[in-house]
Image (cartoon, helix red, strand yellow):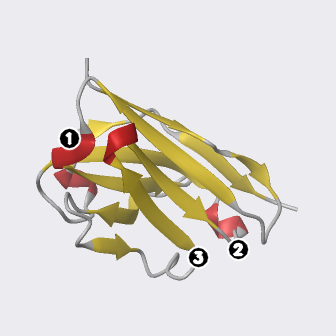
């Protein structure tokens, strides 16, 4: 059974850091592009950061450039999203997603999705 499980969300103050994890089971991430997406209440799901199969193409949304870092370890079947200098506008449910071979950072491109983890940034 193909499954992606996110973890690491929580309630933090502005300026704090969080590291989200996405672990795959039922398949190996070696041949998959991985994306982190988020959805705030009343808003559409948007791409935050995506990493290609060979790590040669990494994309960040303008709103998170310089603050978020995506990384992967195929041996651990895990992808991370390191988030620093968090802002209240980063509050959302964060999802990881996978697609075989393809790249890009559009939600419609991704086939497998996790259940999401809540990130709340508030003082």
For the residues labelled 3 and 2, the Cα–Cα distance comes to: 6 Å
Mark sitting on residue 3: none
Identify whether 71 is placed above or below 68: above
Q: Which residue is at a point 34% across and 55% down the rendered structure image?
A: 35
User: Circle 3 sits in a helix, a strand or a loop, which is it?
Assistant: loop
Tag nearer the camera, 1 or 3: 3
For the residues labelled 2 and 1, the Cα–Cα distance comes to: 30 Å
Mark sitting on residue 85: 2
For the residues labelled 1 and 3, the Cα–Cα distance comes to: 27 Å
Locate residue 46: give its quadrant: bottom left
Q: Which residue position is annotated with label 1?
A: 111
Instruction: Confirm or deny contact between disc 3 and disc 2 (CB under 8 A).
Output: yes
In x, y percent, where is residue 65?
49, 80
- Would you say residue 45 is visible in this rendering? no
User: Circle 1 sits in a helix, a strand or a loop, which is it?
Assistant: loop
Q: Earlier in the sequence, mark 3 or mark 2?
A: 3
Locate residue 13: give its quadrant: bottom right
Q: Which residue is at a point 38% across and 54% down the rendered structure image?
A: 72
Q: Earlier in the sequence, mark 1 or mark 3?
A: 3
Residue occupying the far top of the picture: 1
Q: Earlier in the sequence, mark 2 or mark 1?
A: 2
Q: Which residue position is annotated with label 3?
A: 67
113 lies left or right of 53: right
Q: Which residue is at a point 42% across and 60% down the rendered structure image?
A: 71
Q: Quadrant of the N terminus?
A: top left
Sort mark 2 into few (<14), some (14-19) or many (20+) by Cα contacts within 10 Å: some
In x, y percent, where is residue 101?
11, 52
Q: Which residue is at a point 31% across and 72% down the rendered structure image?
A: 58
- Would you say residue 80 is visible in this rendering? yes
User: Circle 2 sits in a helix, a strand or a loop, which is it?
Assistant: loop
């Amino acid at each position: 059974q193909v499954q992606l499980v996110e973890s690491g969300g929580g309630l933090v103050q502005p300026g704090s850091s969080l590291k989200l994890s996405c672990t795959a089971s039922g398949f190996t991430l070696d041949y998959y592009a991985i994306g982190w997406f988020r959805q705030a209440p009343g808003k559409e799901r948007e791409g935050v950061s995506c990493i290609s199969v060979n790590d040669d193409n990494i994309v960040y949304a303008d709103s998170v450039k310089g603050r978020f870092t995506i990384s992967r370890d195929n041996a651990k079947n895990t992808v991370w999203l390191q988030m620093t200098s968090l802002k209240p506008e980063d509050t959302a449910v964060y999802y990881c997603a996978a697609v075989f071979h393809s790249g890009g950072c559009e939600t419609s491109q991704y086939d497998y999705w996790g259940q999401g983890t809540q990130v709340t940034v508030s003082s």
